[in-house]
Image: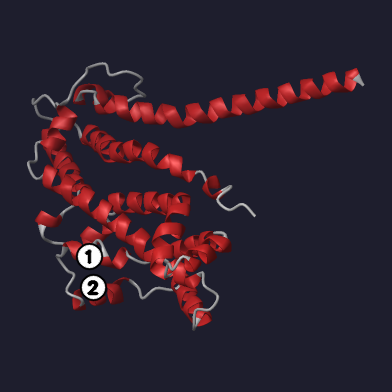
Amino acid sequence: MSGKVVKGDLDSRIFNFINMSLLLIFTFIIIIPIWNVLVSSFSSGRSLAEGGFVFWPQEFSMENYRAVFRDETIWQAFFISVAKTVIGASTHVLFCAMVAYAYSKQNLRGRKLYSALGIITLFFSGGMIPTYLLIKSLGLLNSFWVYIIPALFSFFDVIILMNFFRNVPKSLEDSAKIDGAGDWRIFWSIYLPLSKPALATIALFNGVGQWNDFITTKLYITDQALYPLQMKIYEIIVQSQTNTMQNIGGSVVIETTARGVQLATIVITTLPIILIYPLLQRHFISGMMLGAVKE
């Protein structure tokens, strides 16, 4: 019997060792490229032009970041990106949550029809040109609200929230109705607080999508005052590539390269998401309802 126990412990240790080894390998696979991007962004144009993998900057330089922030309109673009991310993610989550709350009720009239129409939107769309004509007819061209209104609804997120709302104990809603609460009060005071993990997850993914969105500006915005950070950085990268091509073969010392500016912009655009993620991570724990109702 003791031999079987010892063998079981040995197998468990081997299994844990293999898991830890694989975890370390995957961690290094993820961290090393990120570290290379971060370090290379602080390297001079001369050292980047030499090529090769960089573990530490041979010539430390802030010129790549100066090239990005040299444009005075970069801060206005940053404000537009922050505003459309915060407003877009908040309104998207709230709108989808309200629709999902209605869908979660079995007594909703026409529920099957609404579900069928929503499922169709997951597989078919009007296409780029009809969508552009619709945006134009709504007067959203060159408007800040073109970032918000078209992104309000996602039936996929509604399905996620609807299934989450169905797991809320019915006795909580019944007790609230006994106390005189209506659907709106139940939605705000019971369903939303107990659904923070799902709401935080959808807010994070939608916020990242809003922050990285580039095609909306490219299609519907020509006013540079409404350019978000992604579009402004795109212009900076194009300009840096043009300057680098003009300096090829000349005697001018290249302080920045197109690659250096690109790496700096990657760090700048990724840093806000990295800082926000830990704040939402604590809401990903889905066991918040555990013990909420005691039968």
Location of the N terminus by quadrant is top right
Q: Is residue 121 above or below residue 275?
A: below
Return the residue nearer the eye: 197 or 157: 197
Return the residue nearer the eye: 137 or 239: 137
Mark 2 crowd level (few <14, some 14–19, many ≥20, 10 Å Cα): some
Q: Is residue 288 above or below residue 14?
A: below
Mark 1 residue element: helix
Residue 63, numbered label: none
Q: Looking at the image, what colour scheme do you see? A: secondary structure
Instruction: Kindly identify which residue carries mark 2.
Output: 135
* Horizontal side of residue 5 vs 275, given as left or right: right
Residue 238 location in percent, x, y?
18, 45
The residue positioned farthest toward the top in the image shown: 58
Distance between mark 1 and mark 2 Cα atoms: 8 Å
The structure residue drawn at horizontal position 55% and vertical position 27%, both measured from the top left corner, is 25
Residue 122 location in percent, x, y?
46, 69
The structure residue drawn at horizontal position 17% and vertical position 69%, both measured from the top left corner, is 141
Q: Is residue 275 visible?
A: yes
Instruction: Kindly identify which residue carries mark 1.
Output: 146
* Horizontal side of residue 39 vs 59, given as left or right: right
Q: Is residue 97 visible?
A: no
Mark 2 residue element: helix
Q: Is residue 2 above or below residue 84?
A: above
Location of the C terminus by quadrant is bottom right
Report if the CB atoms under discs 1 and 2 are less than 8 Å apart: yes
The structure residue drawn at horizontal position 23% and vertical position 73%, both measured from the top left corner, is 135
What is the three-letter code of the residue carrying label 2? Ile
What is the three-letter code of the residue carrying label 1? Val
